[in-house]
Amino acid sequence: MVHGYNLILVPRDPAFRPTPDQVTSVVKYLVERLDIAEREFSVDGEDELSLKDAIDHLRSAALSPTGGTECLVGFDDMVCGEIFGYDRESPDPDAHFWADELKLQVNAAPFPYGDWEYEDAYCAKCGARIEQIHDLLEDLRLSGQALACPCGARTPPAELRMTSGVRLSQFAIAFLGNRGWLHEVEDDRAAFQDDGFLPMLEELLGTDIEVIAVST
């Protein structure tokens, strides 16, 4: 079975937050490895930012005590398919993941990442299930605001009661694709056919990385 996915890379340690220098190293590595062109970055709605401006913005966010930010890059055609082993000439090209966007996210506090098609979140005070949690969290990611419950409680996302598949992280690298990748997999890291890609990111960040496949 083939299913659409995004692949989210998060540090295994939920308390890990990259330093500005680590942010710089990771961004420069991604630019080189994925052949990202100059002025391809979009941050908070500002398009065509230079690499320097994008790095400066993310470095500042890594030091900020509040809120968060997202830096987005759109790929032309098949720019990053190689690291996933994608081959458009293959009899079944959708057997491999490929992405058309890359998103870097920096959060001021640990933020929940999970496959919200299957995961649930509950109010920390009354235990009520939070409906449409994915959309709510996406709206709160940048503001850093607490999540309101009808019982009156306002709970920071990191303090929600959440099912076990959820990972908390202050930094994420997201490959957005909705293209291919097998649904029944034991290790989501296997989506990356470039054996050196994830180890290099782990070396630059100085911490282990988990890969989360998120349904689209």
Image (spheres, grey):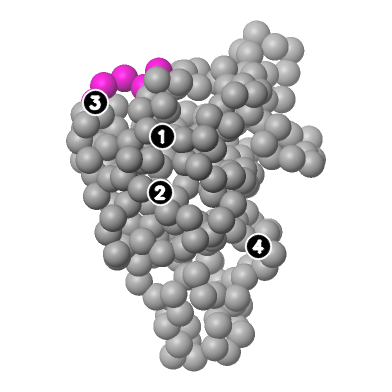
| Three-letter amino acid code at the position of disc 1 | Val
Which residue is the site of mark 2? 18
Q: Which mark is residue 39?
A: 3
Give how far across and how far down residue 30 sits, in percent. 42, 28
| Three-letter amino acid code at the position of disc 3 | Arg
Q: Which mark is residue 26?
A: 1
Q: What is the secondary structure assignment of the residue under circle 1?
A: helix
Q: Quadrant of the C terminus?
A: top right
For marks 1 and 4, the one nearer the N-term is 1
**Do the numbered discs 2 and 3 sit on residues whose CB atoms are within 8 Å?**
no
- Measured in 3D between alpha carbons, the distance from the residue under mark 1 to the one under mark 4, in whole angstroms, is 29 Å
- Measured in 3D between alpha carbons, the distance from the residue under mark 4 to the one under mark 3, in whole angstroms, is 37 Å
Vertical comparison of 143 with 97: above or below? below
Q: Which label sits in the foreground, 4 or 3?
A: 3
Name which quarter of the figure residue 27 lies in.
top left
Front position in the image: 206 or 100: 206
**Do the numbered discs 4 and 3 sit on residues whose CB atoms are within 8 Å?**
no
Which residue is the site of mark 4? 119
Report the side of 212 relative to 136 (left or right). Answer: right
Point out the stretch of residues depicted in magenta. Answer: 35-39
**Do the numbered discs 1 and 2 sit on residues whose CB atoms are within 8 Å?**
yes
Q: Is residue 197 visible?
A: yes
| Three-letter amino acid code at the position of disc 2 | Pro
Report the side of 155 relative to 179 (left or right). Answer: left
Give how far across and how far down residue 160 sits, in percent. 54, 75
Report the side of 189 relative to 136 (left or right). Answer: right
For marks 3 and 1, the one nearer the N-term is 1
Name which quarter of the figure residue 93 lies in.
top right
Q: Which label sits in the foreground, 1 or 4?
A: 1
